[in-house]
Amino acid sequence: MAVISANRIHVDTGALAHNYRLIQEAAGHAPVLAMVKGDGYGHGMVRVAKTFSNEGCRNFGVAELCEGIELRQAGLAGEIYVTVGFSPDDAAAFFTYNLTPVVFSTSSITALATEAVQLGKTIGVHLKVDCGMGRLGVGVHEVEYYQNLIGRTQGVTLVGILSHFPESENVQTESTKQVFSVFSDACKVLGNDFPGIKHIANSGAVLNFPETCCDMVRSGIALYGYSPDGVADHGQINGQMLRPAMALTTRVAMVKEMPAGAGISYGHTYVTNKPTRIAVLPVGYEDGYPRLLSNNGEVLIKGQRAPILGRVCMNLTMIDITAIENVQPEDEVVLLGAQGVEKITADDIGNKIGTISYEILCMLGKNNQRLYIE
Ligand SMILES: *Cc1c(COP(=O)(O)O)cnc(C)c1O
């Protein structure tokens, strides 16, 4: 039998499927593009794409070209959007692997066109417009230029226009309405008879501004069970909650009694003020478990919360189990997820260290062996 790490990511594929169905329900007639960048937000890109595919998903989004190739090589069908651009030198791969380019430069359009003409093919491209995000995309005033450029360039055809919301998780600001209005103007430039698809909504927009769903929604974090604003209660669609799909567990390596006045871990940033029983866990920042949780985080053991004592090391973390009976080496410890009635979410961990669920899921998911629960 293969020996595997004590630190294990558990991915609940049933939760992924449940979340997909909820998002599709919220998006109405608009198909859902599943964002599977970041190795499927740490859940495993190929496996989650296949799970969504089984639920009827036909559109997938990655950041880089190499990720799209990996998905295709794994046998995934459907459209695969490459969203952050590509080197013109790599344009041929879009044809080899039947991938969908998102463009925002003349050089990428020219490179695709050159390849297309050589192959005697035509490729559909989606134009990325910056409508207020302040990130990737051409200006609204450039849409007409790009429409004309693509229109007169043999081998490429404009099949979509897209943009992105900077704060759709926030219902208190006018931002989403404003950005959507700019996007609507950009779409108008293309004319009423533009046959392509328009897409801008991310998870926050699907949850909070369903009127922006247009012809497709691009959802990421909600598919993995989290509300983009970090408030679990907001991750709700028609009275049904999104379900976090990821958990991380480890096992107790050692239990020991420390006297009062004992320093714990590097730098002795924690010193016991009474006799204290600790458990040593074989997990650390190497596994994506943030060092910022030193003297700050909590884990679950025997269904109870146990605080982290001292610094999180590369491969070891100490917890206080003085108040918890009968802890033994090999006992399961939950770092992320539920145990009994208690749970620790990626939002909980993010809140403690000043970041968001997205980053926690990526860090933990990509640094640990994943097991899939069907
Ligand atoms: C990541 C991403 C999304 C999905 O965002 P979520 O907040 O995770 O739903 C949508 N569109 C683009 C272009 C993205 O990069």
Image (cartoon, rainbow, N blue to C red):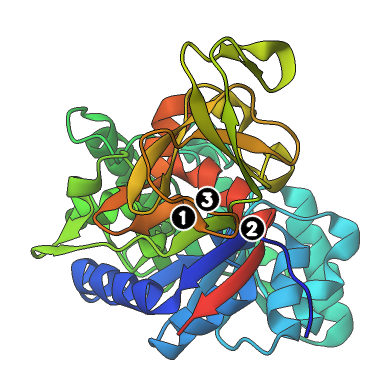
Q: Name which residue lies at 54% across and 25% down.
A: 309
State whether residue 253 is above or below residue 79.
Answer: above
Residue at mark 3? 361
Does ligand 1 reach within 8 Å of label 1's beta carbon? yes
Q: Decide which of tag 2 and tag 1 comes sooner along the chain.
A: 2
The percent coordinates of residue 45 (x first, y second) are 61, 69
Q: Quadrant of residue 149?
A: bottom right
- What percent of the width, then of the height, locates residue 127? 56, 56
Residue 89 occupies which quadrant of the picture? bottom right
Image spot of residue 170 (x, y percent): 25, 34
Query: What amino acid is found at the position of numbered circle 2 in the picture?
Result: Asn
Q: Is residue 281 above or below residue 292?
A: below
Using residue 82 as the reference point, say whether residue 176 is left or right of it: left
Give the quadrant of the N terminus: bottom right
- Does the residue at mark 3 contact the one at mark 1 (Cβ under 8 Å)? no
Numbered badge on residue 328: none
Q: Residues within 10 Å of mark 3 (few under 14, many from 20)?
A: many
Quadrant of residue 148 within the rendered picture: bottom right
Q: What element carries label 3?
A: helix
Residue appearing at x 62%, y 46% in the figure: 363
**Mark 2 highlights which residue?**
7
Residue under numbered circle 1: 162
- Mark nearer the N terminus (3 vs 2): 2
Q: How far apart are marks 3 and 2 (CA)?
A: 14 Å
